[in-house]
Amino acid sequence: CSLGCPGCFNPHTHSKGGGRTIAIEVLAQRILARSDIEGVTFSGGEPFEQAAPLHALARLLRPAGLSILAFSGFTIEEIRSGSVAQKALLEACDVLVDGRYDPKRATPRLWRGSSNQRIHFLTPRHLDWLPRIERVERTIEFQIAPDGSVTITGFPEPRLSRSLTGKPPSS
């Protein structure tokens, strides 16, 4: 991700040289082998800076009925005026949460870390969530890897962050 939003919860995903390489078809097969999911979420590093391969992945997942939700630091307006690949990825999404994270505007609202971020329902698929999106529903996901490392996804309250890590959240 080249955006470098202050307070980003996953700055370790920013390096273009980081991560692992996997064939799109292999990743699609792994996802499609799961029977316990209804969709996938594309999040940071910035999905729209990886638009072509993510669009290719979405094209393999859509026929199986999986939904696509994307979190982007770009606004929908920036994406719509972006590259052909970015526009194609946007077209493949059911829901887009857009806008750069701003720690000065933190919010506990569903799917957003800061109040400037917006939720766009791009297809009718998840419109049933509309009545719930303004409720206070801060959620945090903990992933524990086989090596014991823990990844926290979301924006925990500062007190929880301090108790888990011994230091305040980055800002």
Image: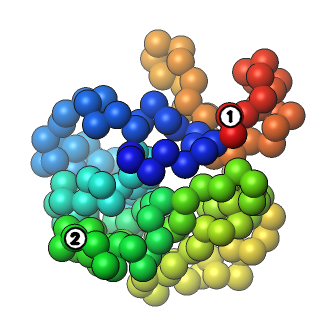
Q: Secondary structure at mark 2?
A: loop
Q: Earlier in the sequence, mark 2 or mark 1?
A: 2
Say which amino acid is labelled 1: Ser
Residue at label 2? 83
Q: Quadrant of residue 12?
A: top left
Left or right: residue 29 versus residue 139 is left
Left or right: residue 133 versus residue 108 is left
Name the residue: 55% across, 83% down: 127
Location of residue 145 with respect to 1 vertically, above or below: above
Residue 7: give x, y in percent of width and height.
Answer: 63, 42
Q: Quadrant of residue 123?
A: bottom left
Name the residue: 33% across, 79% down: 80
Residue 97: give x, y in percent of width and height.
Answer: 52, 67
Name the residue: 54% across, 65% down: 99
Q: Secondary structure at mark 1?
A: loop
Name the residue: 49% across, 45% down: 4
Residue at label 1? 170
Say which amino acid is labelled 2: Ser
